[in-house]
């Protein structure tokens, strides 16, 4: 991967893409005041250099919950008995393939990990906890907080002014 410093145009492109990645190349070019070919070339370069991990659609959890029965969201704190590098990496590797685990953060101080988990309902959450926590001898403590309402959700990373 090519390494390069971000200039004002790169920062403007990244900012716009975080806000709305569905913009056409023409609309994105207009928003950052460059030509469409320049815009396309720069976005491709940002992707290839790893500045853009991926582009996704953010779904409405409220609409999905009502359309597909009730959805359950939990913020889960996990504390391990051993915190050596191998144990921490093993836990991360265990939770990474689980679709229900939407986010995993290694944190300090306090618990070792905070997870954001979405399941269809409580029985699905219980099955997940059995797979990930109860069967893992290195998991010492699990504390879950269940969301009753999402009042804010975002994926926008504040960028420095160009």
Image (cartoon, helix red, strand yellow):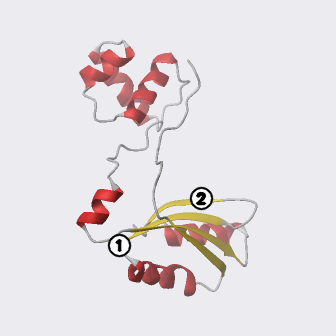
The residue depicted at 53 percent of the width and 23 percent of the height is 6
User: Does residue 136 sit above or below 148 in this rendering?
Assistant: below
Q: Secondary structure at mark 2?
A: strand
For label 2, the crowd category at 10 Å Cα-Cα, with few meaning under 14, some 14 to 19 and many 20 or more, is few
The residue depicted at 35 percent of the width and 43 percent of the height is 55
Viewed as shown, does residue 12 lie left or right of 136? left
**Residue 19 percent coordinates (x, y):** 40, 33
Q: Nearer the viewer, residue 38 or 66?
A: 66
* Quarter assignment of residue 136: bottom right
Q: Nearer the viewer, residue 52 or 155?
A: 155
Q: Residue lying farthest right?
A: 109
Q: Is residue 19 visible?
A: yes
The residue depicted at 68 percent of the width and 75 percent of the height is 80
Q: Nearer the viewer, residue 155 or 6?
A: 155
Check disc 1 and report the residue beneath it: 120
Check disc 2 and report the residue beneath it: 105
**Closer to us: mark 2 or mark 1?**
1
**Residue 50 percent coordinates (x, y):** 47, 38
User: Does residue 19 sit above or below 54 in this rendering?
Assistant: above
Q: Is residue 38 visible?
A: no
Sequence-wise, the earlier of marks 2 and 1 is 2
């Amino acid at each position: 991967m090519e390494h390069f410093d971000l200039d004002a145009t790169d920062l403007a492109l990244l900012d716009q893409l975080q806000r709305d990645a569905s913009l056409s190349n023409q609309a994105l070019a207009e928003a950052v005041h460059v030509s469409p070919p320049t815009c396309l070339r720069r976005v491709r370069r940002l992707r290839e250099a790893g500045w853009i991990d991926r582009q996704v659609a953010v779904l409405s959890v409220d609409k999905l919950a009502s359309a597909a029965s009730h959805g359950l969201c939990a913020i889960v704190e996990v504390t391990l008995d051993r915190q050596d590098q191998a144990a921490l990496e093993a836990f991360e590797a265990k939770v990474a393939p689980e679709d229900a685990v939407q986010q995993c953060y290694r944190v300090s101080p306090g618990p070792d990990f905070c997870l954001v988990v979405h399941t269809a309902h409580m029985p699905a959450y219980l099955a997940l906890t059995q797979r990930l926590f109860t069967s893992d001898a290195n998991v010492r403590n699990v504390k879950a907080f269940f969301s009753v309402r999402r009042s804010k959700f975002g994926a926008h990373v504040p960028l420095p002014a160009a």
